[in-house]
Structure formats: C-alpha cells, structure tokens
Image (spheres, rainbow, N blue to C red):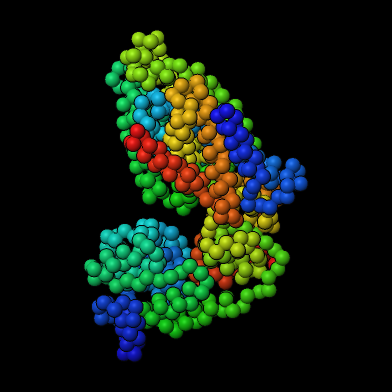
C-alpha cells in the first residue's frame, strides 16, 4: 500500500510540479471521454465512475452513471456537482483550461492523449495507477499493445473512410481509423494524407477508386449522399460497397479495439 | 476591347477548371473521361453560374442600399440558410437534397422577415432599415443555430458549418440544371431595372423626379437579388467576397451604368469563382481548400487596394 501511494505521489509530482500531495486511489471518478469510461470499466474501476459524458454508452452498466453533458468542453459545475476526487480528461485545447479550473477548486485531474492505438496502453496504465488497480490495468494494456505488434500482412483490399460528404472529408494517415484499416489488413487509399482528416475533391476519390466506402453510421442504412448524382461517379458508391460501422465500436480507441479489428476483417471478407 | 478581355478571361477560367484537377487526366482523354464529364464540367459551370449570380446580386444591392459595403449575404440570408441547414441535420431530414432545400427555405424565411422589417415605416422600403434588419435577423438566426448545435445530440452537426462555409463539392448536372432553370428570371428582372438603378444612385427623390418608379424598383431589386443569393447558398453555401469585390472591380472599368455593369459583374464573378475553385482543388492536392478561403485570399488584397485608391482620391 505504501509503495502504491509512493508511486502515485511520484507520478503526480512528475506530471504536475505544482500539484498537491496525492491521496489514495481515486474512489469517485468523472470520465470525460467514452474511451476512458470503457477503460475504467475494463480495469475493474467501473463502480467508481460517478460521472460520464452523454456519449459514454458502453458497457451498458455505464448508462446507469449520471451524465454530465457533452464533455468537450466539460461543464465544470456539472462535473464538480458529482464530487469527484479524479476527473479524467482528453488532452485537447479547451480541456486544458477546464482541468486548471477543476484543480483550482481542489479536484484532481489528469489529461490523457487518446488518438491512436499506441496511446491505449499508456492511458490504461495511468488510469490503473490512479485507481490502484495496476495489475488488471497491466493485463488490459498488454492486450492493447499486442494489437500494434501483430499487424497482418497487407492485402489488396482498399477502402476510404468518408466522414462527411459536402465537402468530402476523409480520414488520413494520422488517425485511429487508418490504423484500424491496416490492422484489419486493408489499405486506406488516403494513407498518404498526413493529417487525421482532410477535405478532398470528389474526383480524387474517384481516381483512387477504393473498393469500399467506410462510414461511421449507427442507422445501418446507406448514407444519403449515395443517391446524389456526383457521388455516383465513385465506383464503390455505384456498386453499393458501403461499410456501415457503428460509431460506438469503431469510432473510438479502447478495450474493444481488438473486437473492432476482427469485425472489420470479417466484413471485408479477409 | 475591355469586353473581349473579360470574355476571354471568363473562357480561360472555365477551360482551366476543366483541364486542371487533382486527378491526372491526360489531355487526349479529356473528352472521354468520366471524371471530367461528371465532376469537373458541372463543377466549373456551377462555379461560374454561382459566382456570376453573386456578382450581379452584389452590384444591385450596393446600388439599392447605396452602401459600397453591401454584400449579398449582408441582408440576413447566410444566417437563415445556416439555420435551415442545421435544422435539417438535427431533425435528420431524409434524402440527398434535404440540406440544400432546408438552406434555401431558411434563406427565404430570412428574406421575408427582412423585407417585412424594411416596410415597417409604411409602404416605402427603407434601405437603411433593410441593412439594419438584415444584420439583426442574421445575428438572431446565427444565435439560434449555435444554440441548436450546442444542445442537439447529432454528432454530425459540427459538419454543418463546413457545408455553410461554402464549396462546390455538391456540383452535378442536377444542380447545374436547377440553377440554369432558376437564375434567368431574377437576372432578367435585375437587368431590366438597370436604368432605374442608375437613377437611384442620385438619391430616391431625384430618381423619382427623373421618372423612376422608385418603390417598385426597390422591391423588385431587393427580391430578385435575394432570390438569386438564396439559390447560390442552397447549392454552394456561403461563398464570401465575390459579391462584394467583383462589383467594385467592374465599376472601376465599366463605370456606374448598370446596363454594362451588371453583365460585367456576372462574367467577372463567374470567372473569379471558377478560377478560385480551380486553385482550391489543385493548390494542395490531394487535399482541398475551402473555396471561401481562396476567394477571400484573392478578394481581400484587391479590396484593400481599392480602399486605398478611394481614400487617396
């Protein structure tokens, strides 16, 4: 126990020089990203989650936790009203200020990166340390790390992720979805675009001719743009080769990334 | 001479936007390429028609409200269109045309409200109230839009702003045909009002003495220019600076006679937008720039230059 405490003290001192002395493992946690909520439940800290965002829909038990709203940026008062001793935030612009405000009213916060598969292991280990559940966290993290180590050989299957149709926004190399595709053995035709997402011309999509158009969709029906004349210039659209991926499973890196990769492989017939 | 230069520029803008693009299409295959026929040609034509419409709408509105800063979107139309588009997404309206139709309806609603406000002092349409009413209605619509975006659950709502910022990605033969059927009427109404618009520059009273039916002209011009802008926003979002800068550029060369100014603004606006869109598609290929960024990057320096000339002169 003492050692565990020491680890937390050292960790917190390391990431926040001005921080207060740390207390024991967190007992009341507000999670401000669906991925963090999933990780907390996966490492056995689910019963300590006292607040979540409106988007946190997995595992089903998470839905019983009170929502504090959108999460990005967080509603500080709604978060504070849950009386948390730890708030887990996604490391991005508006959240940095929010974390400072929470710290000022005496609530411990941690800002974590979670953009790609390689962020999963470190985020899970950090949450393990903060909750005193290092062992469970380590085994979950090891499974996550192995996703990167065991990449299948690339096949000739190609796809493009289209996140918006007008203007067409696609997913580029710097993103989690691009990693999902390559982990499933498929090639994202826009993996040469360095940014996580980018606006492209429709004719670029036509010229790169992906076999599949992947869209995040919870409805399971082909997107409305499938019927637009200009989109029918894309072969995959004409042939109805859509991959309709539910956002809850495919739209976020988390403990279910392995499941997402498996299902993507299956849907692609690989 | 100046007409031939302008027509040549317009042709050049159209040809470059068909020949150049992010996908490599060899010149020899240009006429048989699916990409060229189904994507580039309609997009070039739509850019030209929208740019031209914005140029004419801008020129007429500047004359109507006698304010050089008037822009087709100043009179609340962009706010109304944005509200319509966001509502279409938040309410999950189905169909491939839901968004443009909702934006068009939103723009028409804003147009109606501003028009009604303009008549608030009685039967005469007051240009000053049109301006103030337009800004107020636009701000009000923008506030409701932001409220919906921050309260609604649809994750794709943020993308509505991408659409609203303007772009010609939605171009197809369908949209070109729609625009081709729609714009001749408001364009003809504005062109027919050329002479009274010239007189209006002298002031409403003087225009009346010189035989212009001032009230009818003002209403016709306001409605026609706004209907033109509403169509443009429905097919391509809010594309800034074309409707502001092009009329001023045209005035520098063609003077203040609207019979020449309006056609020049049409050709000039069309050429500018077709050219800007070609740049947007090719400058950072395979990525694409929002076309509004390009029109502003070209338009603002030109505008600054003009302002300087005016203040010196």
In the rendered view, would you say A195 is above or below B40? Answer: below
| Residue A151 appears left or right of A129 | right
Whole-percent x and y of residue B43? 61, 40
In the rendered view, would you say A89 is above or below B60? Answer: below
- The residue at the point 38 percent across, 37 percent down is B309
In the rendered view, would you say A86 is above or below B4? Answer: below
Residue A157, by quadrant, is bottom right
- The residue at the point 37 percent across, 67 percent down is A89
- The residue at the point 39 percent across, 67 percent down is A91
- The residue at the point 76 percent across, 43 percent down is B32
* Quadrant holding the N terminus of chain B: top right
Residue A122, by quadrant, is bottom left
* Quadrant holding the C terminus of chain B: top left
Q: Residue furthest left?
A: A105
Q: Would residue A38 be visible to someone looking at this image?
A: no
Relative depth, front residue between A147 and B9: B9
Relative depth, front residue between A97 and B196: B196
| Residue A140 appears left or right of A239 | left
Whole-percent x and y of residue A151? 63, 75
């Amino acid at each position: 126990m003492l050692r565990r405490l020491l680890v937390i003290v050292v960790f917190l001192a390391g990431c926040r020089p001005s921080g207060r002395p740390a207390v024991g493992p967190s007992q009341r946690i507000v999670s401000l990203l669906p991925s963090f909520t999933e990780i907390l439940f996966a490492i056995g800290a689910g019963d300590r989650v006292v607040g979540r965002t409106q988007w946190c829909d997995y595992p089903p038990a998470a839905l019983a936790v009170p929502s504090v709203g959108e999460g990005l940026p967080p509603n500080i008062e709604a978060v504070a009203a849950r009386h948390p001793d730890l708030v887990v935030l996604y490391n991005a612009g508006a959240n940095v200020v929010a974390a400072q405000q929470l710290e000022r009213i005496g609530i411990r916060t941690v800002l974590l990166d979670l953009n790609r598969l390689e962020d999963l292991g470190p985020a899970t280990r950090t949450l393990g340390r903060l909750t005193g559940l290092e062992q469970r966290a380590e085994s979950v993290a090891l499974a996550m790390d192995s996703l990167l180590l065991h990449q299948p050989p690339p096949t000739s299957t190609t796809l493009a992720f289209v996140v918006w149709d007008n203007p067409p926004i696609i997913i580029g190399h710097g993103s989690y979805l691009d990693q999902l595709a390559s982990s499933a053995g498929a090639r994202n035709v826009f993996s040469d675009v360095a940014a996580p997402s980018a606006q492209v011309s429709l004719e670029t999509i036509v010229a790169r001719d992906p076999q599949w158009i992947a869209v995040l969709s919870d409805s399971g029906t082909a997107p409305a743009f499938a019927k637009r004349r200009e989109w029918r210039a894309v072969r995959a659209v004409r042939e109805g080769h859509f991959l309709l991926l539910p956002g809850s499973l495919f739209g976020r890196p988390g403990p279910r990334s392995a499941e997402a990769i498996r299902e993507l492989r299956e849907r692609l017939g690989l | 001479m100046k007409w031939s230069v302008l027509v040549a520029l317009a042709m050049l803008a159209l040809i470059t936007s068909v020949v150049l693009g992010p996908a490599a299409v060899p010149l020899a295959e240009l006429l048989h390429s699916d990409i060229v026929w189904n994507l580039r040609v309609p997009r070039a034509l739509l850019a030209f028609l929208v740019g031209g419409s914005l140029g004419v709408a801008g020129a007429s509105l500047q004359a109507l409200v006698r304010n050089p800063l008037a822009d087709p979107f100043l009179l609340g139309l962009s706010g109304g269109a944005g509200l319509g588009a966001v509502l279409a997404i938040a309410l999950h309206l189905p169909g491939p045309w839901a968004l443009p139709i909702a934006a068009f309806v939103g723009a028409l609603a804003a147009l109606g409200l501003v028009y009604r406000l303009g008549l608030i002092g009685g039967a005469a349409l007051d240009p000053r109230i049109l301006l103030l009413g337009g800004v107020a209605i636009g701000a009000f619509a923008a506030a409701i839009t932001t409220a919906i975006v921050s309260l609604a659950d649809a994750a794709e709502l943020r993308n509505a702003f991408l659409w609203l910022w303007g772009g010609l990605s939605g171009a197809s033969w369908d949209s070109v045909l729609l625009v081709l059927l729609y714009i001749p009427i408001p364009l003809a109404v504005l062109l027919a009002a050329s002479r009274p618009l010239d007189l209006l520059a002298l002031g409403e009273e003087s225009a009346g003495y010189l035989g212009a039916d001032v009230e009818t002209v003002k209403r016709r011009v306001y409605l026609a220019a706004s209907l033109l802008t509403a169509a443009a926003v429905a097919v391509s979002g809010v594309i800034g600076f074309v409707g502001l800068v092009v009329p001023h550029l045209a005035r520098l060369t063609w003077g203040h006679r609207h019979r020449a100014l309006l056609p020049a603004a049409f050709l000039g606006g069309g050429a500018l937008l077709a050219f800007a869109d070609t740049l947007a598609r090719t400058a950072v290929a395979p990525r694409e720039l929002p076309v509004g960024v390009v029109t502003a990057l070209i338009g603002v320096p030109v505008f600054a230059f003009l302002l300087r000339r005016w203040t010196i002169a």
